[in-house]
Image: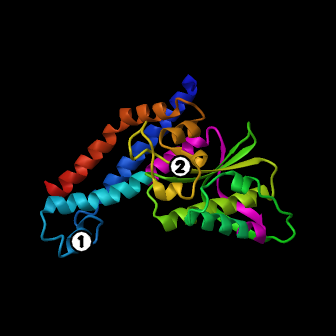
Amino acid sequence: MLSQTETKRIESIVRSHLNSFAIGFKGRHTGEVDNPEGAINLKKQNVFMNALPNELIYYSALVRSFDSSFGNLLERMALEIAREYYEVSQEVTGQINPRQIDHINDMLTSYKNRITTPKTEHYQDYNVEAFSTKYATHASDHVFFDKLSNTYHIIELKAGGDLDIKKAEVEKRALLEQYFILKNKTTADVKLHFATAYNKFGEGKGWAQERVQRFFAQSELLIGRAFWDFVCKSENGFNTVIKAYNENVQVLIEALNEIREAYLI
């Protein structure tokens, strides 16, 4: 369970990020009301959309902008909470062996062609002498280092988890390369994760994103509740974040109402 101090800190982080997001999102869009090249007004330049009701054009443009921005909000919020419990970085640098790269290619080809299903043992049990390496730098969504367990967690976070088959392969390749780069320079454990900020099928329900599961083992997934519990290092992490969000979401609702008034009323 989270302590009272930890709970208050998480609540403060959620409240702060929601307030900042609401102010920024409202300011951006209300400031573009008279700008024909603004995110919402630009939609009207589409002659096919322009023949439709103005309210439909508005919501179509706003939802697209909100969806992208909101995913970034959740990611920034998770990152700040994680800093309370992990050493957080967003880059992996070091050496990687060409034979390790070949092994990654073999694994991904096998997954793509459904010859084998993903298993963590496919890379965890692969060891080669570093007789020839090349230097590599990888930007990463999140790398969390847990001092207590001496474990690195390399995380690819997507808000809802929607990836096409090519993107899923690319993301797993990047994680595997980061895995071997770290393993070549540390004795710490290294784990890979594909995470989502929410379960788009509904919290508590099964998660069946086949294109992701083609390349990721079940044990590598942190979906919705599991991700927030992991970030907070508590079985009550998800509940704490959601409670804080619901208690402070009114500021975002008010910002959205003001944007609507600026464009439609």
> How many other residues sit within 10 Å of disc 1, few (<14), some (14-19) or many (≥20)?
few
Badge 2 is on which residue? Answer: 195
Q: Nearer the viewer, residue 236 or 167?
A: 167
Give the structural element (helix, strand or loop) at label 1: loop
Residue at image position (49%, 35%) is 238
Q: Is residue 62 above or below residue 145?
A: below
Q: Position of residue 223 (x, y in %)?
A: 50, 44
Q: Is residue 121 left or right of residue 12?
A: right
Q: Nearer the viewer, residue 32 or 69?
A: 69
Q: Is residue 121 above or below residue 164?
A: above
> How many other residues sit within 10 Å of disc 2, few (<14), some (14-19) or many (≥20)?
many
Q: Is residue 28 visible?
A: no
Q: Position of residue 67 (x, y in %)?
A: 36, 55
Q: Position of residue 203 (x, y in %)?
A: 42, 38
- Asked whether residue 97 is drawn in magenta, I would say yes
Residue at image position (57%, 24%) is 1
Residue at image position (36%, 47%) is 22
Badge 1 is on which residue? Answer: 36
Q: Is residue 46 left or right of residue 74?
A: left
Q: Is residue 47 visible?
A: yes
Tell me where residue 202 sits by quadrant. top left
> Which amino acid is tagged 1?
Pro
Which numbered disc, 1 or 2, marks the residue closer to the eye? 2
Give the structural element (helix, strand or loop) at label 2: strand
Q: Is residue 150 above or below residue 66?
A: above
Magenta segment boundaries in residue numbering:
72-101
Quadrant, the C terminus: bottom left
Residue at image position (56%, 65%) is 112
Q: Nearer the viewer, residue 125 or 1?
A: 125
